[in-house]
Image (cartoon, rainbow, N blue to C red):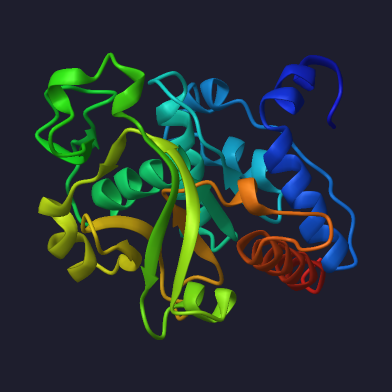
Amino acid sequence: METGKYTKLNDAYISVIESLRHACALNDSELEIKWILSEEMESIIDSEDNKLQEIFADINGVLVPGGFGERGIEGKIKAIAYARENKIPFLGLCLGMQCAVIEFARNVANLQSANSTEFETNTPHPVIDFMEGQSKNIQKGGTMRLGAYPCQLLIGSLVESLYNASSISERHRHRYEFNNLYRNLLTEAGLIVAGINTEQDLVEIIELSTDIHPFFVGTQFHPEYKSRPSKGHPLFVAFIKASLNNLIKKSKFT
């Protein structure tokens, strides 16, 4: 499933793929990737839920990686919605986290027009927006948040237990951020802000309670940058473990 027309995707997401392989080794399992083209997902209308069921029937975990631009965004959001509603383990990286915030805002917090200003400049609910002081310089690469930044983890959160630490440092490569103007509204609706850069008060990690979803985590940073063959990243390791548990659970009912 990693050949043919998906060869370019293998190259583009090599660090993510290798991180998944590191995590599989630690879970005594093998990696099988099913690529889903988000642009094809966009063509599925809401009334065609049977098509979504067919696509996700053999999928035990959903990962939405990083990226830039509006291409395929609505397809990514649709895949995240399916994973959330059907309790499929989900891991969102950078843009993947931002899409998860948009999906949650629209479908749980009832902000039906929520979006990122990267994709829709005039959205009435910019739940993802520029960092403060960047909007006048968006064409300059130097406006991106690059490199390692500290992150304080929420006590009692899932990610705190996975890292087994109260504070971490992870690497970034992005410009747009979680809009703090919507933080209270979204957390009241059930979204958990599990990690914050306290120096700039920026949301770094979101998750859902394990009481309502087995594994739903999104990170503004790129954990794949720190995964190694001898030391798989804890978020990838936990994602693979949750996906294996989902496979076992499904096999009991087939």
242 vs 132, left or right, is right
Instruction: Note whether 82 is above or below 154 in the view shown.
Output: above
Q: Position of residue 222 (x, y in %)?
A: 53, 46
Q: Residue at x 83, y 61 (%)?
A: 230
Residue drawn at 39 percent across, 41 percent down? 99
Q: Residue furthest bottom?
A: 156
> x, y percentage for residue 76?
48, 35
As rendered, which of 37 and 68 lies closer to the eye?
A: 68
- The quarter of the displayed image where residue 28 is located: bottom right
Picture quarter with the N terminus: top right
Measuring 21% from the left and 60% from the top, which residue is drawn there?
186
**Of residues 79 and 236, which is closer to you in this image?**
236
In the image: residue 131, left or right of residue 46: left
- Measured along the vertical axis of the image, is residue 84 above or below residue 5? below
235 relative to 141 in the view: left or right: right
Quadrant (top left, top right, bottom left, bottom right) of the C terminus: bottom right
Q: Where, by quadrant of the figure, is residue 24 drawn?
A: bottom right
- Return the x and y of residue 225 as percentages of the image width and height: 62, 46
* Visible residue check, residue 58: no
